[in-house]
Image (spheres, rainbow, N blue to C red):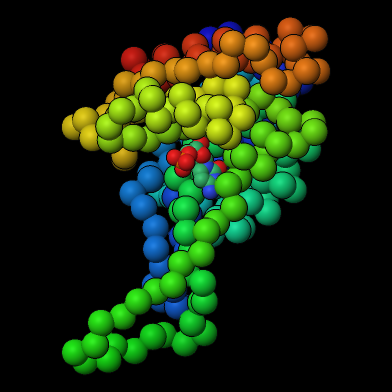
Amino acid sequence: FQAGSMTGRKVVITAGPTREAIDPVRYISNHSSGKMGYALAQAMAEAGAHTILVSGPTQLPVPERVTRINVESALEMAAQVEASVEGADVFIGAAAVADYRPANVAQQKLKKTEGMSNTIELVENPDIIRAVAERADRPITVGFAAETKDVQQYAASKLHAKKLDMIIANDVSQVGIGFNSDNNAVWVLRRKAPLNAHDAASGGSEASAALLEESIDQMSKAQ
Ligand code: C5P
């Protein structure tokens, strides 16, 4: 897509997994590599956008002209998004945010008790993308849905429940296109009328949405 087409626009992207501490040496996490969020950040920066990448732990290098903010937990990611999203034109939630975190983080390494089972109490994490979508000055808000069945139905209900403008859905049960893969095959579901009144008036929503669709499409084909 065209260099310079996002000049003057601010884009905030979340990427990677989150880590939810159990004790000083253990955590709960997932298999997200961060590749999709980093590729989107690179595409947005190349298109001229001021691009902020709020990233969980990954092995990936920071793309050129992208400002990366490193976080570990969902609470840290939520705080950094909150601190950086003001004035953003586009928000893309590509992170695989843990839905739950341990209710209590042990200050010392937990010890094994021979022959005993153990239970970790979990509490719900904040929904980062929903909070962005509920802002009065909401940017165009784009989410991802990684599903293993009924992909399009789940994605459509998430689009509406989280008040997103667009959702990119993929079937992570398919070999070779799921987590940690360089290839992808996706459905892009868009809301018919933009939710961002300011952008709807300026035509920016349509332009940015079209660019996003194009870049995701190209990444799906090229990688
Ligand atoms: O509900 P689910 O986790 O499948 O939704 C996925 C989308 O919501 C992704 O865009 C993800 O980045 C975002 N999300 C979030 N905060 C959460 C959970 C998911 O921003 N706590």
Q: Does residue 184 sit above or below 82 in this rendering?
A: above
Measuring from the top left, give residue 157's x and y in whole percent: 47, 29
Q: Does residue 131 sit above or below 51 in this rendering?
A: below
Q: Mark yes or no: residue 39 visible.
A: no
Which residue does the image show at 34% across and 27% down from the upper left? Answer: 151
Q: Is the C terminus in the top left, top right, bottom left or bottom right quadrant?
A: top left
Which residue does the image show at 53% across and 16% down from the upper left? Answer: 190
Q: Nearer the viewer, residue 217 or 8?
A: 217
Q: Nearer the viewer, residue 16 or 110?
A: 110
Measuring from the top left, give residue 68's x and y in whole percent: 60, 44
Which residue does the image show at 55% across and 56% down from the upper left? Answer: 125
Q: Is residue 111 left or right of residue 115?
A: right
Measuring from the top left, give residue 45's x and y in whole percent: 61, 26
Q: Nearer the viewer, residue 206 or 212?
A: 206
The part of the image, by quadrant, that contains residue 8 is top right
The part of the image, by quadrant, that contains residue 32 is top left
Q: Does residue 27 sit above or below 178 in this rendering?
A: below
